[in-house]
Image (cartoon, rainbow, N blue to C red):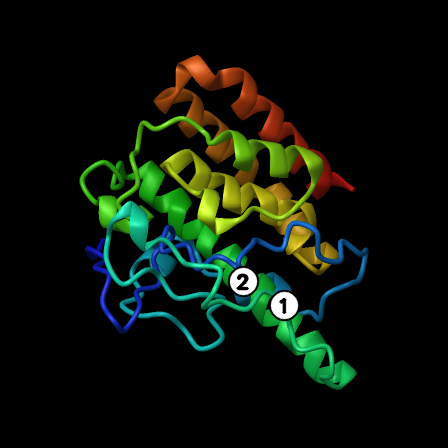
């Protein structure tokens, strides 16, 4: 697995995690039961192939920070959160498809990094945030309300993972995308890892994971 470094040409690592552009994750965006075009099911890559990509693909939903430090997390001033509303319907459908595929790809990359114990020795993957830091109250509160997560509130790896949990509650546009995330156990992977890292915070981790799992199951 390559080592991702935060350079002007962004890597497509999990925790560069290419969060959806904007000051916030798209947790409050449309959570419709639309059916994705058939390409959705095949748009994401396997964990190993996704992790091996040297640079971000076209249509990536965000760029990683310029340096691997907590202060370098994406700022709300430089990222846009939604698809342009004026797009023709067919183009909007494709834009949603690309964004969903991007998130599904990110899930598999982080899955692989967890499985191979890659994260402890590569803090640049998750913006140099404290791996053992607790979830931030503001991030937890936003996720519990079903609101967007503000990147200004990201303080730890747990917060970083909660961004991906928030995608489950509205960030995945198509029903097929939510089904794939559910079938692959993306919430459970994150629940187990966070509970291992932060046993003292198991209750809040479970609460937030339960919210994400319930959203995927709708």
Residue 82: image tag: 1
- Residue 115 placement (x, y as % from top left): 34, 37
State which quarter of the image contains the C terminus.
top right
Residue 193 shown left or right of residue 165 in the figure: left
Q: Which mark is residue 22?
A: 2
Q: Label 1: few (<14), some or many (≥20) within 10 Å? A: some
Location of residue 183 with respect to 189 vertically, above or below: below
Q: Are marks 2 and 1 in contact (CB under 8 Å)?
A: yes
Q: Residue at x 62, y 37 (%)?
A: 143
> What label does residue 16 carry, if any?
none
* Residue 6 locus on image (x, y percent): 24, 61
- Residue lying at the far bottom of the rendered structure: 88
Q: Quadrant of residue 146?
A: top right
Q: Is residue 163 left or right of residue 128?
A: right
Check the image and name the residue furthest to the right: 33
Distance from the alpha carbon under mark 2 to that under mark 1: 7 Å
Q: Secondary structure at mark 1?
A: loop
Q: Return the x and y of residue 100 as percentages of the image width and height.
A: 60, 62
Dividing the picture into quadrants, the one containing residue 17 is bottom left
Residue 175 locus on image (x, y percent): 74, 55
Q: Earlier in the sequence, mark 2 or mark 1?
A: 2
Q: Residue at x 51, y 45 (%)?
A: 163
As helix, strand or loop, the secondary structure at mark 2 comes to loop
Q: Residue furthest front?
A: 77
Q: Quadrant of residue 81?
A: bottom right
Mark 2 Cα-neighbour bin, 10 Å: few <14, some 14–19, many ≥20: many
Residue in the picture at 81% in, 56% down: 33
Judged left or right of residue 207, residue 159 is: left
Classify 27 as above or below 63.
above
Q: Nearer the viewer, residue 66 or 186?
A: 66
Q: Is residue 163 above or below residue 176?
A: above
**Left or right: 180 as drawn, with respect to 8:** right
């Amino acid at each position: 697995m390559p080592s991702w470094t935060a350079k002007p040409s962004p890597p497509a690592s999990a925790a560069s995690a290419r969060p959806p552009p904007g000051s916030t994750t798209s947790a409050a965006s449309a959570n419709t039961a639309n059916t994705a075009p058939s390409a959705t099911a095949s748009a994401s890559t396997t964990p190993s192939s996704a992790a091996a990509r040297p640079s971000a693909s076209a249509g990536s939903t965000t760029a990683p920070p310029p340096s691997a430090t907590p202060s370098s997390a994406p700022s709300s001033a430089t990222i846009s959160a939604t698809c342009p509303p004026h797009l023709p319907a067919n183009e909007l459908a494709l834009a949603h498809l690309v964004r969903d595929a991007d998130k599904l790809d990110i899930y598999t990359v982080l899955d692989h990094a967890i499985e191979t114990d890659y994260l402890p020795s590569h803090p640049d993957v998750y913006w140099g945030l404290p791996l053992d830091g607790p979830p931030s109250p503001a991030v937890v509160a936003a996720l519990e309300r079903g609101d967007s997560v503000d990147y200004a509130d990201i303080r730890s790896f747990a917060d970083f993972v909660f961004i991906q949990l928030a995608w489950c509650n509205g960030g995945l546009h198509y029903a097929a995308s939510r089904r794939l995330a559910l079938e692959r156990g993306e919430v459970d992977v994150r629940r187990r890892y966070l509970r291992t890292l932060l046993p003292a915070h198991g209750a809040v981790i479970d609460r937030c994971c339960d919210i994400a799992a319930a959203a995927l199951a709708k």
